[in-house]
Amino acid sequence: MFLALGLAISALNVYVSPGILTGIFAVGLSLLFTSIYRHFKYGEGIEQDERTKKIMYRALAGSWFVTLVLVTVLMMADRFDVKIDVEGALSIVFFFMVFSFSAFNWYFDQKGE
């Protein structure tokens, strides 16, 4: 949908900031590739049971905790005159949260229970 929105905006010559248009295309492409990957890996659907849900909830909790620690570190960086704009700080937090969730999910899945 985002990819189609980006194509429509480009085709209709509607002025949109290049950053926003690039973001729309990036989100659209990432959603497309993620759905293709999941289709080839899992086929009809992801099978969830109690174990996978427990792993996912533990990974989410761990990800939130380390993200809050990261936000605290970013706030402390401001105290030491490290200047980060809002866009940069949000980008750091977003990508760290996605990465940490994936890492925790992988770790708890490998650990087993």
Image (cartoon, rainbow, N blue to C red):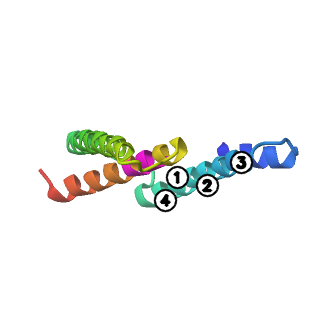
Viewer-proximal residue among 49 and 112? 112
| Label 4 neighbour load within 10 Å: few <14, some 14-19, many 20+ | few
Q: Earlier in the sequence, mark 4 or mark 2?
A: 2
Identify the residue shown where x is 35% and y is 40%. 75
Mark 2 or mark 3: which is in front? 3
Q: CA distance from mark 4 to mark 2?
A: 12 Å
Which residue is denoted by mark 1 in the rendering?
A: 35
Q: Nearer the viewer, residue 60 or 73?
A: 73
Q: Nearer the viewer, mark 1 or mark 3?
A: 3
Let me know if residue 21 appears in the view. yes
Q: CA distance from mark 3 to mark 4?
A: 24 Å
Three-letter residue code for mark 1: Ser
Q: Residue at x 43, y 51 (%)?
A: 95
- Real-space Cα distance between discs 1 and 3? 21 Å
Q: Which residue is mark 2?
A: 29
Query: Of the residues under marks 3 and 4, which one precedes in the sequence?
Result: 3
Q: Position of residue 37 (x, y in %)?
A: 48, 59
Residue found farthest to the left:
113
Calculate the distance from the C-alpha at mark 2 to the C-alpha at mark 1. Answer: 10 Å
What residue type is disc 2 on?
Leu
Q: Which mark is residue 37?
A: 4
For the point 46% across and 45% down, the residue is 89
Q: Residues within 10 Å of mark 2 (few under 14, many from 20)?
A: some
Disc 4, SS: helix
- Residue nearest the viewer, comparing 61 with 57: 61
Q: Looking at numbered disc 4 in the image, what kind of residue is underneath it?
A: Tyr
Q: Tags 1 and 3 in contact by the CB under 8 Å rule?
A: no
Q: Which residue is mark 3?
A: 21
Q: Main secondary structure of the magenta part?
A: helix
Q: Reading the chain from its start, which is encountered first: label 2 or label 1?
A: 2
Q: Which residues are magenta?
A: 91-96
Mark 1 Cα shell of 10 Å, populated few (<14), some (14-19), many (≥20):
few
